[in-house]
Image (cartoon, grey):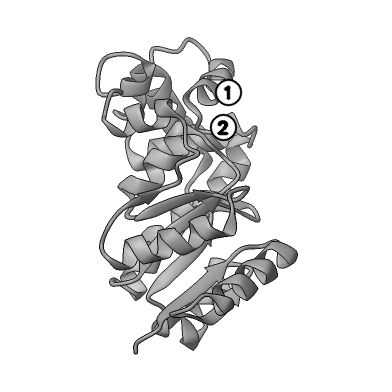
Amino acid sequence: MHKISVYAVDDHPIYRKGLTDFISKCRGFTVCGDADSVQKMLADADFGQADVLLLDVSLKDCSGIDFLPQIFSKSPAVKVIMLSMHNKPFILKSAIENGAMGYVLKDSEPEVIEAAIHAVCSSKQYLDSALSDSIFSLLSDNTSGTGKGGLYNSLSPREQEVFRLIAEGHSHAAIAEKLFISEKTVKNHQTNILNKLYLRASSEIHPLAEKLGVI
């Protein structure tokens, strides 16, 4: 009988150890590896055996969601379940839009992880039942109108990255270094963001980001 092979990426050693120990004890599952970063996982030959990837949303200095294109480029068939402490609409929406098939809150019971793995391996999307109704309505594309949520979706992927980093308090220089672009390009993105969202100043980005659940 084929066992479902699971790989786990989380930068908290205690949580990751508990997670992999639980999975290894589940009937029909096997743990093929674990890592504290996506970079280490991608360099690990054992990742190639994974049917399912359990990926932390909030890794050190980055979001696991940002790595999904790179992950699928290396392993197109892997099913990704995001693990998160955040019950925020736009984080969930971003994960699903970038290819994740599951989203589980980290304070849920271990059996939720087990159910999520079975679901995604049956090509079914799995969303933690603890997620609020507002998140489900967001996934129903209720943000496609002319409100701030809909306008946020009009930003390009790069502009959304810059929006989030500005909201988190990063300087133009820090954003430029992180995204491998010039400070002038960052400022141009900021100008476009303000224009598209009808904001008067960059100081309005942080409170809007909190309202939208981007940070």
The percent position of residue 144, horizontal first and vertical second, equals: 25, 23
Q: Nearer the viewer, residue 123 or 92?
A: 123
**Residue shown at the point (33%, 27%) measured from the top left:** 137
Other-residue count near label 2 (Cα within 10 Å), few / some / many at <14 / 14–19 / ≥20: many
Q: Secondary structure at mark 1?
A: helix
Q: Relative to 57, is 52 above or below?
A: below
Mark count: 2
Q: Which residue is mark 1?
A: 206
Figure quadrant of the C terminus: top right
Q: Are marks 2 and 1 in contact (CB under 8 Å)?
A: yes
Label 2 sits on residue: 166
Q: Position of residue 25 (x, y in %)?
A: 58, 78
- Against 68, is 25 above or below? below
Q: Going from the N terminus, do you reach mark 2 or mark 1 first?
A: 2
Estimate the x, y position of residue 87 in percent, counting from the top left: 53, 36
Q: Amino acid at mark 1?
A: His
At a point 46% along the width and 28% down the height, the residue shown is 190
Residue drawn at x 39%, y 12% as measured from the top left: 198
Image quarter where the N terminus lies is bottom left
The disc labelled 2 sits on which kind of residue? Ile
Residue sitting at x 34%, y 47%: 96
- Give whichever of 45, 107 is nearer the camera: 107
C-alpha span from label 2 to label 1 = 7 Å
